[in-house]
Structures are given as C-alpha cells and as structure tokens.
Image (tube, coloured by chain):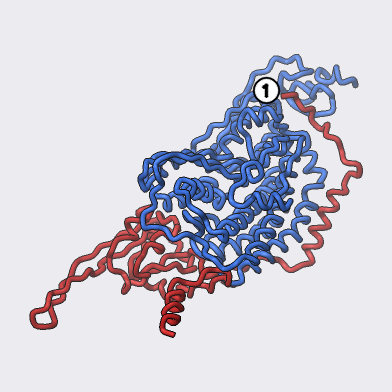
Chain colours: A blue, B red
C-alpha cells in the first residue's frame, strides 16, 4: 500500500468520523481534514478544565480540534486570581512576604527573595554576608525541591507512576532541613528585610550537607528510571517544540526557554546575592538545550538539579568557613521604603520572577507589580499546541512546568 | 507549526535497554527497606521550629493588641475589660490593668506566618509543632484561649544556634557587664 492511497482504503473499516491514516501512512490518526484526507470535517471545540485532573490546578484550555489535530488552543486563565498585587498595596513589607511566597507555592523562598531584595535596594541597606550566603543556599535548595516536583509529576502525567515516589523521597530529604531551619514545609516565611528571620540551628549545616549528598547519590535513580526509558522518549522526543523566536516573543524564561536555546539566566546575566562569586568559581553552570521539545525541557530540569546541588555545596562551604556574624539587620519598628521605584528580578525555579516596587514613602507600597514566570510561559502554549494531536496535549502541557497560582496571581 | 507525523521518532539503538535500566532501579529498591512513615502508629519527629499551631501563655498577655493589629489575615480576636485594684497604701493610687476575656485565633484564616509571635513584646505567643487539630466543621477551627493555653505545654525549647551565629543580645549585654566589673 502506497502512502498516497492510504486514507481512502481504511476509512471504511474505522467507522464514522474516521477519515483515515496520516499522510505518511505510518500513523493511526483518526478523522480530520488534514493532509492526505479529502474529507470535509467539522471542527470540534473541546474544553479541558477548569477542573480537569490532567491539568495542574484550575487552568482551562479551549481547544478547537480537527479530527485529532489541535487547530486552535486558547488558555483561559484567572480562575484562581486572588488580586495579589492589590493585596500587596494594603500590607506592610513584612506582611507582603507572607503573600509573596504563595503565588508560586513551589518556589516560595525565591519569590520571597525578590520582595526583600527590592525593599533593601530602595532602602540602600547592606545585608550581612552570612544572610546573603544562607539565602543563596536556601534558594538553591528551593530550586531543587521545585524541580524534583516536576521530575516526578511529569512522568506521572505521561503515564509513568513510579518516578514520583522517588522524586518525593528526595523532596522529603531536603524538605526536612528546610523545615528545621524555617519551620515551614512550603511557605517558609524566612526572609526578612535586611536578612533572615533567625540564624540556623546548631548542626544544621552538617545535616544539609548530608541531605545534599544523599539527593546527589540517589538522583541517578530517577534518571535511570525514566530518562532513558524508550516509552518516555517516544512520548516526548520531538513533541511540542517551542521555537526560539516564539520563546523570545512571549518572554518565556527559565528552564523551558533554556531548553529552546534561550541562553538567559539571571544568576549569571544579572547576578544578585553572591552568584557572581560562584560564577567566577565555575560552580554556576547555565544548562541549555537546543531541541526545545518536551524531552529537552525535562533534560534541562534534571541537569539544573545537579547544578543547584553543587551550588548548595559551595554555599555550605562558604558558610562553614565564615566568621561569626549577624544574619539580619536590626530594623526599626516601622519600615518605610523611600519615595521612588525599583525593579528587582530573580531567577526563580520556573523562570524570571520580577517585582516592580513603587513607593511613596509609606509603610505600604504604592504599587507592587508582579511579573510571574508561569504567566509568560503559558502564553506560548497555544503556539506549541497548535498542530499537535490531542494525545500529546497532556505531555506538552506537563512539560511547560507551570504553577497555576503563578499564572493567576 | 509543522505537523508531526505520529510514530516517527528516531528510535534508540538498542530498544528496551532503557526499560531494563529502569527495572534494575526498581529491583534494587525492592530489596531495601521502605521509607514510608507509618504515621498514625509512629508519630513524626518534628523540629522545634515547626509551625504547627500557635499556643498562648495567657498569663503573659497584656492585651496590647499588637498581634491582632499586625496579623495579615486579621484572624485574632481579643476581648478584654479593665479592672481597678484599690490602692494598698494610704494616699496611694488605684491601679488599673487589663484582664483578658477572650483570645480566639481562627485557624481557618491563619496563614501561619508567625508575625503575631514576632511582634508580641511579652512572649505570650509561641509556635508548637502540634498539628492534629483538624475539624469536621470550619467554624470549629476557631480556638479559644483555654485551648491555646493547653498547647503551651507542648512548646519545645528553641534550638541552639549555629556557632557562627551572632550571640544572643542578652548574652552580649551580660558579657559586657562582667567586663566592666573586672
């Protein structure tokens, strides 16, 4: 059977609505007026969400289908909108930290960090060295926690149940030390303007060292389990390619953009905290891929975990040889940012997270604009999904690594 | 975007090698002890800083309302009245002081941010790692001062700080006072 006469031959056997095989004759796609078919078909609108279990949280997708092909996709966001920017305006800077770590619940520490960096810059405040390095350590541990979540949940979405148990075992190892230092498992609330809430408990750095070593030792298990798996590769290789120009056009950032070859990492390109020193030491590596498909995005995440573990080790080393010193600046009862504005952005686990802080000299900000990573990343989703088949939809959606709270804010 | 023909991925050289590798991981873990925590039978060991629930040392509270005002979720409800103690000596003044009538925290609103504990100037509020206070009705999550006082018995002592940490303010003051004496 030659590929050209494929469609007309099989349409009978597959029942109503099926126009036949795909153009090259190797697939088994049903329906649609795509190439190789001369059937006129009606488009169907498929609604996914807002409570669909295949999506994270309450994202809704309105998709127009031509047979099994997605011809149009419209993400409908805002079901979880909490008006966080407006809430920021009626809270003082300490209360803002509570809210700032909630929009992206998987990168709470990094999101807190942006707020305090903005306020500290406005105040012209010098943060103690111990605070800087501890913040960096915790931010990297937070990145590992975030990435492990997706390293576990993404295989789950494409049908592999096992990796999430391994990912969560590693998460638990790190979460234990995070809980010991901050008291929280998700919403750490450990940053304060001028440093951290309190110093680390005795022996904590040693336990972090052990946790990092344990995760590094067991990380190859996740890699062996899923990364080389043929079924996983068949589901993700060449699927959902995000072209580099689309990534640029939509302001896509983070591991997703780097998987498409956008070589941007704020830790290197606009260093905050003390990342500059780690970059000079060569510990900070920026992971990039060029393929831009689901597999590359997953690979980026996996490689970033390794880099983050190295960074955590470097921070620990510095902390242990550092002289005795304070971890925060004693603040007055009321902290007022002077009149003016600043934009502080950080490389959050999911991408660039920015705060534009405008102050009129009050104890609350006049405006605090939040630029969250997932919102921009998900904006590119229609471009990736259009032309794909429905069966790949969840594989692509899962590989865009987003948190709905971060989209809806 | 170009349409991707289905089933046209470049296949790996040795098909099934990756699958076997994954199975080897599973097998190795099968021979090890599981990491599952047997929660209701074995209680978790939580670090002293764990933010489980807020306990109230009622005796320390002076009804200054700082916690209720600073709370970003406004979930602390305080009620009090003034009492006057008559002067004990001839020609002395009557003393008035606040008496706490009600101190409720609505844990369905609480964001566990620990701002109230930080701002309390008399150390009346403390975190405790206690976490088993789930209720069937959301209204039952508002706990009164007696319940909060009971939790006070479960408050752990704070952990010792890292030796790189700055010494506590009190220690520094004492050290300087001793130095001045000698």
Q: Is residue A344 left or right of residue A160?
A: left
Give the answer, above or below, for where A114 lies relative to A132.
above
Give the answer, above or below, for where A175 lies relative to A27.
below
* Residue under numbered circle 1: A66
* Extreme residue toward the bottom, this view: B182
* Local crowd size for mark 1, using a 10 Å CA cut-off: few (<14), some (14–19), many (≥20): many
Residue B176 image offset from top left, x and y in percent: 44, 77
Q: Which residue does the image show at 74% across and 40% down from the upper left?
A: A288
Residue B173 image offset from top left, x and y in percent: 42, 75
The secondary structure type at the circle numbered 1 is: strand
Q: Is residue B163 visible?
A: yes
Give the answer, above or below, for where B88 lies relative to A191.
below
Residue B50 image offset from top left, x and y in percent: 51, 65
Q: How many marks?
A: 1
Image quarter hosting the N terminus of chain B: top right
Q: Is residue A86 visible?
A: no
Q: Which residue does the image show at 67% across and 38% down from the upper left?
A: A264
Of the pair A44 and A349, the residue shown nearer to us = A349
Residue A20: quadrant of the picture: top right
């Amino acid at each position: 059977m030659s590929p050209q006469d494929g469609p007309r031959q099989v349409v009978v056997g597959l029942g109503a609505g099926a126009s036949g095989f795909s153009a090259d004759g190797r697939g088994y796609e049903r329906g649609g007026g795509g190439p190789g078919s001369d059937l006129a078909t009606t488009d169907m609108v498929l609604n996914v969400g807002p409570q669909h279990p295949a999506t994270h949280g309450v994202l809704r997708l309105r998709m127009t289908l031509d047979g099994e092909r997605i011809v149009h996709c419209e993400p409908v966001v805002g079901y979880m909108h909490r008006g966080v920017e407006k809430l920021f305006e009626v809270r003082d800077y300490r209360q803002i930290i509570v809210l700032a770590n909630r929009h992206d619940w998987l990168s709470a520490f990094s999101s807190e960090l942006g707020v305090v960096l903005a306020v500290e810059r406005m105040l012209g405040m010098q943060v103690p060295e111990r605070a800087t390095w501890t913040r960096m350590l915790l931010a990297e541990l937070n990145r590992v926690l975030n990435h492990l979540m997706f390293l576990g949940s993404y295989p789950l979405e494409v049908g592999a149940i096992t990796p999430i148990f391994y990912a969560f075992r590693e998460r638990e190892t790190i979460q234990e030390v995070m809980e010991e230092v901050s008291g929280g498992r998700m919403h750490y609330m450990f940053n304060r303007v001028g440093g951290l809430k309190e110093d680390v408990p005795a022996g904590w750095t040693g336990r972090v060292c052990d946790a990092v070593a344990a995760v590094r030792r067991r990380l190859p298990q996740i890699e062996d389990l899923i990364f080389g798996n043929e079924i996983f590769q068949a589901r993700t290789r060449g699927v959902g390619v995000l072209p580099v120009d689309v990534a640029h056009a939509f302001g896509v950032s983070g591991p997703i953009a780097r998987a498409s070859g956008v070589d941007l990492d704020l830790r290197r390109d606009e260093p905050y905290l003390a990342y500059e020193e780690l970059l000079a030491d060569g510990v900070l590596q920026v992971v990039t891929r060029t393929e831009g498909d689901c597999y590359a995005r997953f690979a980026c995440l996996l490689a970033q975990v390794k880099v983050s573990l190295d960074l955590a080790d470097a921070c620990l080393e510095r902390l242990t040889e550092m002289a005795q010193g304070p971890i925060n600046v004693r603040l007055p009862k009321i902290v007022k940012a002077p009149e003016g504005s600043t934009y502080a952005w950080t490389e959050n686990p999911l991408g660039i997270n920015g705060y534009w802080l405008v102050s009129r000299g009050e104890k609350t900000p006049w405006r605090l604009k939040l630029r969250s990573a997932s919102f921009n990343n998900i904006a590119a989703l229609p471009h990736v999904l259009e032309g794909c088949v429905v069966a790949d939809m969840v594989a692509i959606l899962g590989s865009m690594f987003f948190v709905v709270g971060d989209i809806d804010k | 975007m170009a349409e991707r023909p289905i089933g046209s991925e470049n296949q790996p050289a040795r098909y099934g090698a990756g699958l076997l590798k994954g199975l080897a991981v599973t097998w190795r873990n099968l021979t090890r002890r599981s990491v599952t925590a047997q929660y209701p039978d074995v209680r978790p060991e939580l670090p002293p800083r764990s933010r489980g629930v807020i306990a109230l040392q009622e005796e320390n509270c002076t009804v200054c309302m700082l916690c209720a005002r600073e709370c970003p979720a406004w979930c602390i409800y305080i009620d009090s009245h003034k009492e006057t103690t008559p002067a004990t000596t001839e020609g002395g003044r009557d003393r008035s002081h606040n008496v706490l009538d009600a101190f409720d925290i609505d844990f369905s609103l609480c964001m566990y941010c620990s701002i109230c504990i930080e701002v309390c100037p008399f150390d009346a509020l403390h975190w405790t790692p206690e976490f088993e206070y789930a209720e069937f009705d959301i209204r039952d999550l508002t706990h009164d001062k007696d319940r909060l006082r009971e939790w006070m018995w479960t408050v752990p002592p704070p952990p010792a700080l890292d030796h790189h940490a700055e010494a506590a303010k009190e220690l520094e003051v004492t050290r300087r006072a001793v130095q001045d004496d000698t």
